[in-house]
Amino acid sequence: MSRFLPDRYTLLLIAVVAASSLFPATGQAGDVLKIATIAAISLLFFLHGARLSTAAIVAGAKHVKLHAAILACTFLLFPLLGLGMQAAFPGLLSPALWMGVIFLCLLPSTVQSSIAFTSMARGNVPGAICAATASNLLGTLVTPVLVAFVLHKQGGGSGLADAGRVMLQLLLPFALGSLMRPWIGEWARRNNKLLGKVDRGSILLAVYAAFSAAAAQGVWHSFPPQDMAVLVGINAVLLGVVLFVTARGARLLGFSKEDEITLVFCGSKKSLMSGIPLATVLFGPADMGVIVLPVMLFHQMQLMVCAVMARRYAQREDAAGDAPAAASPRGA
């Protein structure tokens, strides 16, 4: 049953949401929290730039067909599904929650969990490293543009100004971290666990700031409780459809089983680590809590479902490896 329970980090996220809703930071404390959040998110992207190795990415970059399929799922299939569901059932959710769902669909893929599940399932790990990293790098630029284009009529995004803020707060620290990698890359590699805590701490701080501002603005009274159940259902449909399309699409495209696994786990993910920083830059404090709520729910759902799928892929590979050994006595 532990496979289906929230992990420790998700429990921390839930605790932070509860704490920020009960004890929101307002006034001067809210201003200090906003500055601290911007600094923490910039540090997060700086450290990602310092840790990113290029060797494995170069090795996995040659499979253009696989990477194109993953990017198409991330930045084309997901948005089309989200917009289609909103157009077909606009009354299922409030406009703010629909904006959060669409924002979820516009986010890049995850890096760590995509690679971890691909490795667990015996997939193409170098390809997953390349694809997930490329998705995150492109997402820093592509997601703000898509938000400005898709959500502009609904009040989200403001065109080039948003892209400029993203480049200043996220892409510039990442580039500086990459430039510093010859000097601090080895230190970052040795202290990966410590820097992982910095990553998670930055996200927890951003979540507290987001939901604190939402609570101060009375966001939780702006939509009925049953919207939460509907939101869970919409996230489940999104995840289920994308998992089905990626698995079937990989077979139609003639991918190997290893590449199918990579497409399934990289093409179906949405990044909480990138989503909250991007939302911090792209949306106002009053909207942040509702905007990131679909992302947080989808994050936990994708971890639980993909953990089960990765185990089944691995068991299937183990069974296939044992089959010749079992058949050899009969053929002797």
Image (cartoon, grey):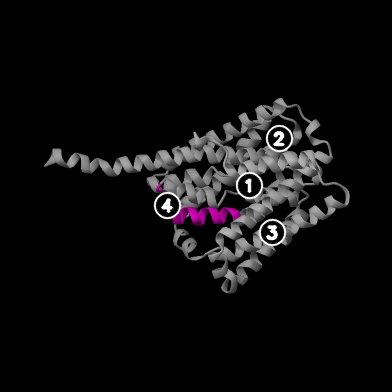
Please name the residue shown 49% across and 35% down the image: 244
User: Which label number is shown at residue 272?
Assistant: 1
Q: Amino acid at mark 2?
A: Trp
Specify the quadrant of the image occupied by residue 89: top right
Residue behind mark 3? 170
Q: Amino acid at mark 1?
A: Leu
Residue 99 in the image, given as x and y percentages of width and height: 72, 38
What residue range appears in magenta?
122-136
Check the picture and name the quadrant holding the C terminus: top left
Could you tell whether 326 is left or right of 86 in the image? left
Specify the quadrant of the image occupied by residue 140: bottom right
Please name the residue shown 78% across and 50% down the image: 158
Residue behind mark 4? 124
Up-down relation of residue 261 to residue 39 (above or below): above
Can residue 261 be spotted in the picture? yes
Disc with the residue nearer the chain's start (3 vs 1)? 3
The alpha-carbon separation of the residues under discs 3 and 1 comes to 15 Å
> Dot 4: few (<14), some (14–19), or many (≥20) neighbours within 10 Å?
many
Disc with the residue nearer the chain's start (2 vs 1)? 2
Question: Given contact means CB atoms under 8 Å apart, are the residues at marks 2 and 1 in contact?
Answer: no
Disc with the residue nearer the chain's start (4 vs 1)? 4
